[in-house]
Amino acid sequence: MVFFVGAGTGAADLITIRGMRLLKQADVIIYAGSLVNPELLQYAKVECEIHNSAKLTLDEVIDIMQKAEAQNKKIVRLHTGDPSIYGAVREQMDELDKLGIAYESCPGVSACFGAAASLNLEYTLPEVSQSLIITRMEGKTKVPEKECIESFAAHQTSMAIYLSTGMLGELSRRLIAGGYRKDTPAAIVYKATWPEEKSYICTIESLEETAAEHGIIKTALILVGDVIAHRGYEKSRLYAPDFSTEFRQAKE
């Protein structure tokens, strides 16, 4: 059986307990070596067979899984963050379906949540933003036209933009063209939760300049929105004294 496991944002201790247990039990681990923290491989047993998928094609990954399944081995496919976000897992699952190989998924902490923790950020501040848009700039992978940056920018809500560090000049122009103010707060978070993490607060207009100043050219998440300023919000009604819940009666 194959277990698709989210490795978390970077820090080895941010993998889920379930994910850690699966790594300890695995007979075969196929990990995304370009982004997964290699410290996680310390959870593997000595006799575990380990493969770096950064050096493999899809067909080669599936071939390893198929051979291991034939030997009744437990297989862990270790993806960065959460497999459901830019994890390219569906194409693997479809191939496993063709082969009749069972699989399950184990969630992980995605980079946008690791970055929020690093900045002590709340994406959904009342009266500022109640939505979070997760997206990316178009690169080798096409983005549907209806999901262009400008269309999302029109909402002026919180955004987490992946896989776009090398296109910050274009990203800034398109965010502003879509509706954000030039001085809208933004953040660049490099390798969120890794020991070498770095974060920089700037504005949408200064994204490219800020990245260049600090030598950030890849492996960074871009956050956009007024929530980054931590101000201008209303307090939650959940804890208001005049608000009743099933656990607490409103106070006079």
Image (cartoon, rainbow, N blue to C red):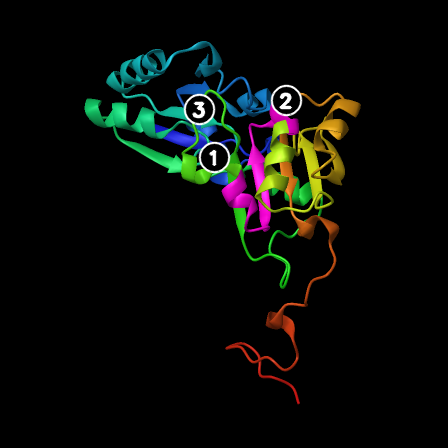
Residue on which the image places disc 3? 141
Res 116 label: none
Determine the image quadrant of residue 69: top left
**Of the residues under marks 2 and 1, which one precedes in the sequence?**
1
Give the residue drawn at x 76%, y 28%: 209
Image coordinates of residue 119 in percent, x first then y, are 71, 44
In the depicted view, which residue is nearer to us: 77 or 207?
Answer: 207
Q: In whole angstroms, how far apart are the C-alphas of marks 1 and 3?
A: 28 Å
Q: Amino acid at mark 1?
A: Gly
Determine the image quadrant of residue 84: top left
The answer to whether residue 9 is seen in the rendering is yes
- Under tag 1, what secondary structure? helix
Discs 2/1, front: 2
Image coordinates of residue 13 in percent, x first then y, are 61, 34
Residue on which the image places disc 1? 19
- Near mark 2 (Cα within 10 A), the count class, few <14, some 14-19 or many ≥20, is some
